[in-house]
Image (cartoon, helix red, strand yellow):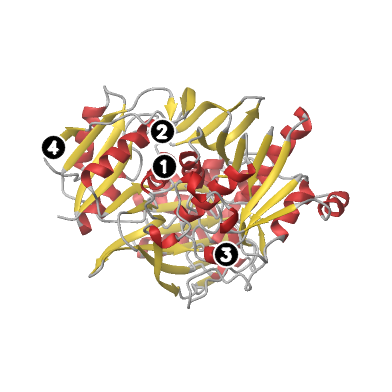
Amino acid sequence: MKIVVLLKPVPDTYGQRVLDLETGLADRAASETVIDEIGERALEAALRHAEQAGDVEVVVLSMAPADSQSALRKGLAMGAASAVHVADERLAGADYVRTAEVLAAALRKTGFDLVITGDASTDGTGGVMAAMLAELLDAPGITRLESLEITADAVRGTRATDGGSMVVQAALPAVVSVTEALPDPRFPALRGIMNAKKKPVEQLTLDDLPLDEVGAALDETASPRSIMLSVAERPPRSAGTIITDEGDAGERIAAFLAERRLA
Amino acid sequence: MNPILVLLPAAPAGGLIAGTAEAIGAAASIGTPIAVVTGPADALPELAEQAASFGAVRVHTAVVEGPELGAPAADAFEAAARLVQPELVLVPATVEGREAAGRLAARLRAPIAADIVGVTRDEQGVVVRHSVYGGAYDVESAATYGPLIATMRLGSIDDRAEAATPDVQPLEVTASGRRAATIERFEPVTQVSTRPDLRTAKRIVSGGRGLGSKEQFALIEQLADTLGAAVGASRAAVDAGYVDPSAQVGQTGTSVSPDLYLAVGISGAIQHRAGMQTAKTIVAIDRDASAPIFEIADLGVVGDLFTIVPQLTAALEARKG
């Protein structure tokens, strides 16, 4: 069985994230690039299954600029067997549909029984990629799994949805996304980090991908795209009044709220 | 007439998904709101009527009630989009809403604008607004050509439309037969709380690790109830098990933008601030004077929450008379 886990290199949410005000694109030099944590959880789920079941190959896949390979290396250090890195300058500023087309084509080329991805990235916060990939790959899709159980020919789990949870199952090959409720990812061991250096990273460009198999054109201007019109930095919020409690702080907050008609 | 199509998958627990009124309100502010509602046959008439009461001038309905997940509703939304030829498709960004938006975008190869907080029109067409990186940036985007499919952050839009006379038209849908996952069963969240929904609440009281225990977190709930507020929490409080994960505010929880955000025992790590710093008024209580939450608070109180919060709750009760 082959499980492909999608990893997205994102600006570290522990630091200040910056948008380039000229291009509207993420300023990748301004903050450290890390694997989105939800992707690490997805990988953890795949690795746990591989350890239990045997005969499971775990592959990590990213579409990201050429210089962001460290994210994939971390995935390899955690225990993935190999990595696929789609990097192409023509993909700078790719929108959701273009990204989904490229990932779907890369998944077709790599082959998969199960694709696991995070439910939403911390930078884009869209939460639509898994559903798009299920459509483009004509595979059953399950978004927002809070638990998952993988067998030789199916995936099953609890899906957190609006107002409740569903028990859902799908025959493989399938595409699923997972939530924060999944177990914490492991830290790569030193041996894992050393081994990662020897593991294969396949480098692909747009020209290597079977885009036609997912109904996509090589030329991205062939389809309508989402474009950024303007970007502005919001003025930072400044601190207001800070007081130290002298026994009446509760009263003072109540008065503050009443004055602003908030109570 | 600039048709704007609003996708309304029925909520699995029944009723329309959250955010319906504001999505139709936003649609009405720039064009003619037309809704497409999917759900079980016996619920559809009432759901369609509700959509009309929120201002949808026409409501297309399609029966979706089998155990198949995602694909059948997408068949209906695709049929509606091809029929209506909208300039913009709006979808409340709930779980089922995002699912519908993603699937429709993949089928139409139409651009997505995710997590929008506003919609306007300029001479060239529809423009949508986003609040990026936890509210640090305001971004506007548009489609090179239409239709644009936009998921709308809940609680971000104040526009509401006048109720419309129901004009309900069943949709003809050809099943695509796409492979789909199977729903074995659905369990609704047993919600005994009458508190407002965190995502759309005008007031939120949030507690952090400073509360110290699940029992003591009740202080937050009492204060919230006095204010008619929703209950929120920091990730630390959720990880410590004081409160349900659905209450988590921040980068990895819910992003909120209420009139009042009252943070109690929350230091204000950058990931928490990313989910609440666009609140209109922020009040913070924490014992650590150097806590970063005070950098963005309109009123910050350094002190012991265990004396301040009960006093505040009592004072608010007294003011209510």
Q: Chain of mark 3?
A: B
User: In the structure shown, which secondary structural element does the residue marked by tag 2 occupy?
Assistant: helix
Marks 3 and 1 on same chain: yes
Q: Callout 4, which amino acid? A: Asp
Q: Is residue A155 above or below residue B152?
A: above
**Mark 4 and mark 3: span between their CA atoms?**
50 Å
- Depth check: give the residue in front, B234 or B183: B183
**Label 4, on which residue?**
B167
Q: Nearer the viewer, mark 1 or mark 4?
A: 1
Which disc is residue B103 wearing?
A: 1
Q: Position of residue B231 (x, y in %)?
A: 48, 46
Is residue B240 among what the camera can see? Answer: no
Discs 2, 1 touching: Cβ within 8 Å: yes
- Depth check: give the residue in front, B1 or B232: B1
Q: Position of residue B56 (x, y in %)?
A: 19, 44
Q: Quadrant of residue B159?
A: bottom left
**Label 3, on which residue?**
B293
Residue depicted at x 22% and y 36%: B60
Q: Earlier in the sequence, mark 2 or mark 1?
A: 2
Q: Residues within 10 Å of mark 1 (few under 14, many from 20)?
A: many
Q: Quadrant of residue B157?
A: bottom left
User: In the structure shown, which secondary structural element does the residue marked by tag 4 occupy?
Assistant: loop
Q: Nearer the viewer, mark 3 or mark 1?
A: 1
Q: Residues within 10 Å of mark 3 (few under 14, many from 20)?
A: many
**Mark 3 and mark 1: span between their CA atoms?**
39 Å
Q: Callout 2, which amino acid? A: Ala
**Mark 1 and mark 4: span between their CA atoms?**
27 Å
Q: Nearer the viewer, mark 4 or mark 3?
A: 4
User: In the structure shown, which secondary structural element does the residue marked by tag 3 occupy?
Assistant: helix
Q: Callout 3, which amino acid? A: Ile
Q: Position of residue A63 (x, y in %)?
A: 60, 56
